[in-house]
Amino acid sequence: MIEYAITDSGQGIAFTDDVIARLLRHSQFDQDTPEVGGQLFARIDRWGVRIEHATGPRTSDVRRLRAFIPNRAAERQEIQRLFKEGLHYVGDWHTHPERYPTPSAVDISSVQDMFRRSKHRLASFVVVIVGTAPLPDGLFVGIANENGWSRLSFRSHN
Ligand SMILES: [Zn+2]
């Protein structure tokens, strides 16, 4: 389990080892491979958010060197299917071909757009970007809503 702290609330966001392993398998070590990504699903209780499932990449996504365009219909189906298993959509992940990833202006505007347009009861969406440096520095974990975004601080790995 790897954990990040949400400042001010005392709550945290945790990722299971399976999810971390799945994301790191797609690290973009080769500058010429396209970006890939998918969705993040969590169990949510009063102790916080535990991300237990990551989807993607899909063959139906459009992949570019510096961007990828997910298949939105497939995404909606994933959200409905996993909701029946008690897993809530909480955000997205994608790769960057850089050691220490940070969100681009497009990353931020697209998550804010998604946040505004989709039906949900979350205070923010989770944004994960997979870079190539070892953990924790090679992973960007943040939250974003229509008002802005912030990076979460790494808390523990056990
Ligand atoms: Zn990006």
Image (cartoon, helix red, strand yellow):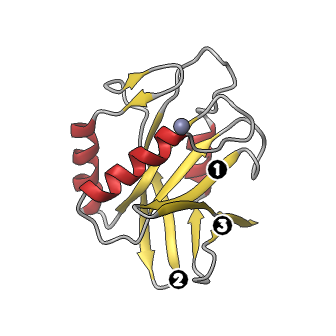
Kindly tell me whether mark 2's CB lies below 8 Å from ligand 1. no
Any part of residue 158 in sight: no
The answer to which of marks 2 and 1 sits earlier in the sequence is 2
Q: Residue at x 49, y 30 (%)?
A: 36
Name the amino acid, label 3. Glu
Disc 3 residue: CB within 8 Å of ligand 1? no
Specify few, some or many for label 1: CA neighbours under 10 Å numbering under 14, 14-19, or 20 or more.
many
Pointer 1 or 3: first along the chain = 3
Q: Which residue is mark 3?
A: 3
Quarter holding the C terminus is bottom right
The picture quadrant where one finds residue 85 is bottom left
**Position of residue 118 in the picture relative to residue 152 (left or right):** left
Q: Quadrant of residue 122?
A: bottom left
Which residue is labeled 2 in the image? 47
Q: Secondary structure at mark 2?
A: loop
Residue 15 picture location, percent across and down = 58, 60
The alpha-carbon separation of the residues under discs 2 and 1 comes to: 22 Å
Callout in the foreground (1, 3): 1
Position of the N terminus, as image quadrant, is bottom right
| Image height of 121 relative to 58, above or below | below
Secondary element under disc 3, as helix, strand or loop, is strand
Ligand 1 is found in which quarter of the picture?
top right
Q: Amino acid at mark 2?
A: Trp
Query: Helix or strand or loop: what does disc 1 sit on?
Result: strand
Q: Earlier in the sequence, mark 3 or mark 2?
A: 3
In which image quadrant can residue 97 be found?
top right
- Residue 140: assigned label: 1
The crowd level at tag 2 (other Cα within 10 Å; few <14, some 14-19, many 20+) is few
In the image, 101 versus 21, the foreground residue is 101
Residue shown at the point (64%, 44%) measured from the top left: 102
In the image, residue 116 sits, relative to residue 46, either above or below, namely: above
